Amino acid sequence: MYAYDQYDQAMVDARVAEFRDQVARRLDGRLSEDQFKPLRLMNGLYLQLHAYMLRVAIPYGTLNARQMRALADIAEQYDRGYGHFTTRQNIQYNWIKLADAPDILADLARVEMHAIQTSGNCIRNISADHLAGAAADEVCDPRPYAELLRQWSSFHPEFSALPRKFKIAVIASEADRAAMRLHDIGIRMVEREGTLGAQFYVGGGMGRTPMIAPLIRDFVPVDQFITYAEACLRVYNRHGRRDNKYKARIKILVHELGADEYRRQVEEEFAHLLTLGIEPPRAELERIKAHFGPPIHAELPPLTAQAGPSDPAAFAEWRAANVLPHKLPGHVAAVISLKPIGGIPGDATAEQMRVIADCAALYSADECRVMHTQNILLPHVREADLPALYARLADAGLATANLDQVGDIIACPGLDYCSLANARSIPVAQKISQRFAASGKGAALGELKLKISGCINACGHHHAGHIGILGVDRKGTENYQLLLGGSEAEDAALGKITGPGFDEDGIVDAVETVADLYLARREAGERFLDTYRRLGMEPFKEALYG
Amino acid sequence: MAELLRFRDDEPVDHPAVTVDAFGGQANAAAVRVEPGDDARALIPHLAHIRLVEVNFPAFTDGRGYSAARILREAGYTGELRAVGDVLVDQLAFMRRCGFDAFEPDQPFDDGEVRAAMSRFPHAYQPAAAGAQPIWVLRHPPANG
Ligand code: HEM
Ligand code: SF4
């Protein structure tokens, strides 16, 4: 894992001092709320319905045990004993007091963490494949490139007042586990004739005008990686729309110019920037790479001394659902579901975070990852340790066996917290999860990605759900539209609305109706999404509106 | 009249700046004002006789002026580069690194806040106009020192 050196540490320490000063100026009135707003947003602090919300950056989702414990301490000391893991691999606290925010940032800085650029119109936290370093299908570990981007984008002087927020994701395999093409820039590391380089997809995004990013360059040599990103950003900063905040994302610029014209402008800027020597040297990439070696395990008691799980059937079910292959022999990656039946997707209590930290330290070479599906991954688990790990997780209520199943729902905070919401998302997620748990159909349905947003901003990725749910406001009451056929993976697609919306109970019934139709009509080996693609919308409409 | 904060020693230009459009037709002006929508590259052929470029920030949230500044410095412009308008002290360090060396904010800065803003971050990850070495140079000093 990356570890700060003196320069990285000095940077976050200075930031804490700066923000402490800005908060003091806000509290004594020297800064107006209008002037303070962009400053606090650059530090991840939003004003929400009931309190301030603080979003902490977790670069490419990677945490060690000490960092996870610090997140638990913050939840206990400054929030209400829990935190919420988000679709951009970050954590949010929903009940923060402004006066506490500088102390929280100081606590974070002590464990090499920060909230820099987690909101506001700047380059946000860089996300990456959660299986980085573990996936058998990767051409390289994408994290060193994500770390290069993290440093380049931190306090970039030119890009601190962009037209709109800017999100970047990095992957290194054909399979896309990071919704790469739904980012402002999606990067895939590729190998061509033995040489490593990067594909740049630019102009994807969700929100009210969802778009799948087109390929802008098929191969950027690694020695020009940062320079190319800078060219992409400069064209956007100069020409992105600023007259209408709903048209300000780079996806609109790329769409209005056309991918070819955007590419031409980027290439022109790129040729110019190459003459300026802004690319970090190869030695810097090598320095960063050295932090991402193969996993080193803690000394464990001999495996035979460990007790097996008390419920072997439940263990087998969990293992079948939540354990993924690893590139090293004898190793696996294990997913800790933060989607217990009827729970709040992505929430974890301080106690649970500590259990996760202990498991990461003992069983996963001191590492865990926040997944964009709002779960936690232990990337490097020895297969032989699985029974012991399972027993530990089951004790803490963290062993729900539902990875990528209908109960593994992504949901945004919705009307329970969010000031922009039209409808509640969390209660709908809870009801759907309970309905399918009661009917026991979850495992039979197999991979079925369900995603819920409480308004058109799409924080819950509803456009990209195999089944998506969008909360809207219909004449003052909460109403839910149903979408089918989206995907955030390598077969990226945007879902289509089925027809008129439903009320809160109606949407739960509607999800069950389309799931049942799939079970009745699927052919061998088909996932829900495949059946939908084969049959088209009509039969589903028929079943829903008859 | 807002106060002028300058990080250079030469005499300020004493006549008002003309717009980029007007400048095209009257090459004897030594001061130009760049608005957010202007293409700073239009000035590049004339940099030799420009002594002041004012970059206007009608709203501090509009960051186009940062790119304009860097583009001019990258093209070799050495005259005064002045940020005017809705310029806040919290942006000072970023602006310096983009190449601005003079500031004429609508709301005058507090001296103490200017000093704090300028000294807060000892290093930066990116190479920038104000001359400081990026962190990656400090980490990997050139072999011949
Ligand atoms: C509760 C406070 C939140 C507010 C006020 C908020 C606000 C917004 C807004 C306004 C957008 C649309 C941006 C645009 O289209 O330009 C957006 C998009 C998004 N938000 Fe949130 N959000 C919040 C919480 C969250 C949470 C908790 C997550 C993660 C679970 C999240 C993840 C996202 C994602 C993934 C997008 C889509 C990005 C895209 O359009 O490409 N947000 N958010
Ligand atoms: S989708 Fe809408 S309701 Fe949900 S968190 Fe985002 S802004 Fe709030």
Image: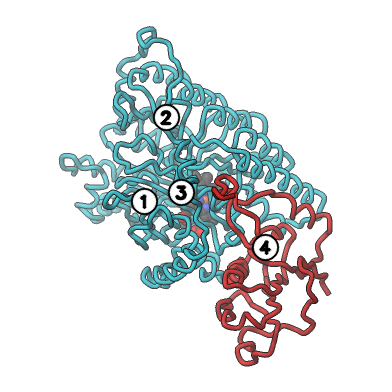
Chain colours: A cyan, B red
Which chain does the numbered disc 2 sit on? A
Mark positioned earlier in the residue sequence (2 or 3):
3
The residue wearing badge 3 is A282
Residues at marks 4 and 3, common chain?
no
Q: CA distance from mark 1 to mark 3?
A: 19 Å
Q: Which mark is residue B95?
A: 4
Residues at marks 1 and 4, common chain?
no
The residue wearing badge 2 is A378
Residues at marks 2 and 3, common chain?
yes
Which chain does the numbered disc 1 sit on? A
Mark positioned earlier in the residue sequence (1 or 3):
1
Mark 3, ligand 1, within 8 Å: the answer is no
Name the secondary structure under disc 1.
Answer: strand
Residue B14 image point, x, y percent: 79, 82
Q: CA distance from mark 4 to mark 3?
A: 28 Å
Name the secondary structure under disc 2.
Answer: strand
